[in-house]
Image: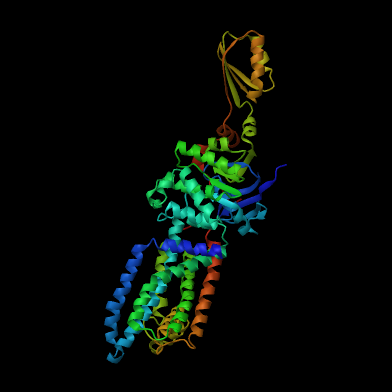
Amino acid sequence: MPESIIRTIDLTKRFEDLIAVNHLNLSIEDGEIFGLLGPNGAGKTTTVLMLTTVIKPTEGSAVVGGYDVKEHPDDVRKLIGICFQEPKILWVSTPWDVLNWHAKVCGLSTQERKTRVKEVLESLNMWEHRHKKVHGLSGGMRKRIEIAKILIQRPKIAFIDEPTAQIDVIGKHKIWNMIRELRESGSTIILATNELYEADILSNRVGIMHEGKLLVCDTPKTLKDSILGGDSVEIRLENEVNQNVLEKLKAFHEVVDVISTNPNNLRVYLNKAEEVVPDIMKLFLKHNVPITSIHMSEPSLDDVFIHYTGSTIEEAEKEKPLRRRT
Amino acid sequence: MKKLMLVVERDLRMFMQYKFLIIMRTIWFASQIAFFGLIASRMVVPDLADVYFEYYVAGVVIMMLYSASVFIGYDIFEEAEHGVFEYLLSLPVSRKELVLGRSIGGGIRSFIFVGPIAAIALLIIGLANPLNLLIAFSALFLFAFGVSGMSITIAVALKSSDRFDILMGVLNAFIIRLSTTMYPHSFVQDANQIYAAITRINPVTFASDLFRWGVGIEKYLTVTPMPIAAIIGLAIFFFTFVFIGVTVYERRLEGGGWQ
């Protein structure tokens, strides 16, 4: 059983009448990338702020790296690093000053500091901008400085809030790789994001938050498989399929529905497509029905989100209901 | 201790960004002594005009030290606007180190700012006893740290830059006017007994007395015995606001509501 590096029990945060986080029970394993997924206003950032001791929980408890956030906040802060959603930098500062001071306060030696600040700034294409005032940099550049803090620090537990917001596509891939490298260097990563694709490709496990509550938590694959008939397989045949083969196809335990879009084309809704498709191919070949092409698609985390919340992440962001104290 | 010094270093670096402010404040000081000080000293009896001018120059140095130490409160709003608070609170620095570091940083940078001004004042007044001046300057650090702590505390408690600006203006009017920066305590006593009682316990009076004692203008001191009474007064002021600062900082920072 993997060891939990973060555990929350009924963690709750109220801001006057608003319940931002509502009895959150969460366990994050040492060394994993945990995706905390949800629309803006779901409670992700508030959760991150409580776990990093920036704000205090109203109720419940949270243990981070073996320390209770309320009882031993100073010990918690020695283990963590945070990349905020919005860059937290004064506009009169320069990237070099910000990162150099951050590295110092996080306890890096002079040599480590110089090497890492240079390495990370170069990797993020920010080296030539290191002495420019922050107010002269674009939103994407500022975000890169924010993420550079955590890449330089390499904390035991890294909280990364919307790491690729305002970052271009090439930059996103670069940052994703750097997050993976950070995990490989020994960090546990909590990735708060509303980008479902980002959570899907980076996370070992995903927790979906909505209206302050954790709805579901598991690996992306298990969550996708939990949607009955979520996979679909489009099969194009040389000949028209007969009723007997169709009945046998429907008899597969994993097959939920079969639709004939035209006489030579079938769309099969099923679970665990990657395991069943070889058997389906065998069935058609056995009955002498050659297959022209086959196309598989699995559900995305978008589908998982819709399945558990009843709305898309964009719709959920538009709703943003006030969660009143009960 | 290392973390505390890093917090101090950060505030010092930030202060160096405000070149325009530093230049303007220096011009303000120059105009205060070149115009107001010279002209107002002609209003006192002719024999004491030069004495009052020196008395006033020493007072202006303390006024400058006070207003430079207050400035860190304005930084707090700048930081709130850019969310830098949350960043500072997430660092491996204890809340005590953070508030103490910021108070000290605010105090030191006001000293850096006031240093050249104090040097000009010494040229005007002269220096009777270097050891006294050294003791006075050491104790004035407590004053500067305390004022910075007070400014941080008020900024964090109010969470409104407009209110902070107005309150600091009003507070400045009270704390400077009801002190001995501009006039000796005996004149305050003649005017009003309540004013005199407040003036006696005002940290700005302690600071003004200490500086005047340090430069050798001992004739019009309020607090005795010098310098012990003034140093004790400033130490109480410093510890009070650092303690209140730590408490208020922790309680008030979270939850937003900054205006």
- Relative vertical location of residue A206 with respect to residue A271 in this rendering, above or below: below
Asked whether the viewer can see residue A129, the reply is: yes
On the picture, is A239 further left or further right than B146? right
Q: Depth check: give the residue in front, A51 or B54.
A: B54
In the rendered image, the quadrant that contains the N terminus of chain A is top right
On the picture, is B204 further left or further right than B232? left
Q: Depth check: give the residue in front, B9 or A61.
A: B9
Residue B239 pos. (x, y %): 54, 74
| Residue at the far right in the pictured view | A1
- Relative vertical location of residue A151 with respect to residue B112 in this rendering, above or below: above
Displayed quadrant of residue A227: top right
| Residue at the far front in the pictured view | A111
Q: Depth check: give the residue in front, B66 or A183.
A: A183
Residue B117 pos. (x, y %): 36, 74
Identify the residue at image location x=45%, y=41%.
A167
- Relative vertical location of residue B180 with respect to residue B258 in this rendering, above or below: below
Q: How is the image coloured?
A: rainbow
Task: Please state the total of marks drawn on the protein image.
Answer: 0
Identify the residue at image location x=55%, y=44%.
A42
Displayed quadrant of residue B136: bottom left
| Residue at the far bottom in the pictured view | B47
Identify the residue at image location x=50%, y=47%.
A148
Residue A256 pos. (x, y %): 64, 22
Residue A170 pos. (x, y %): 46, 36
Q: Depth check: give the residue in front, A302 or B232.
A: B232
Asked whether the viewer can see residue A19, the reply is: no
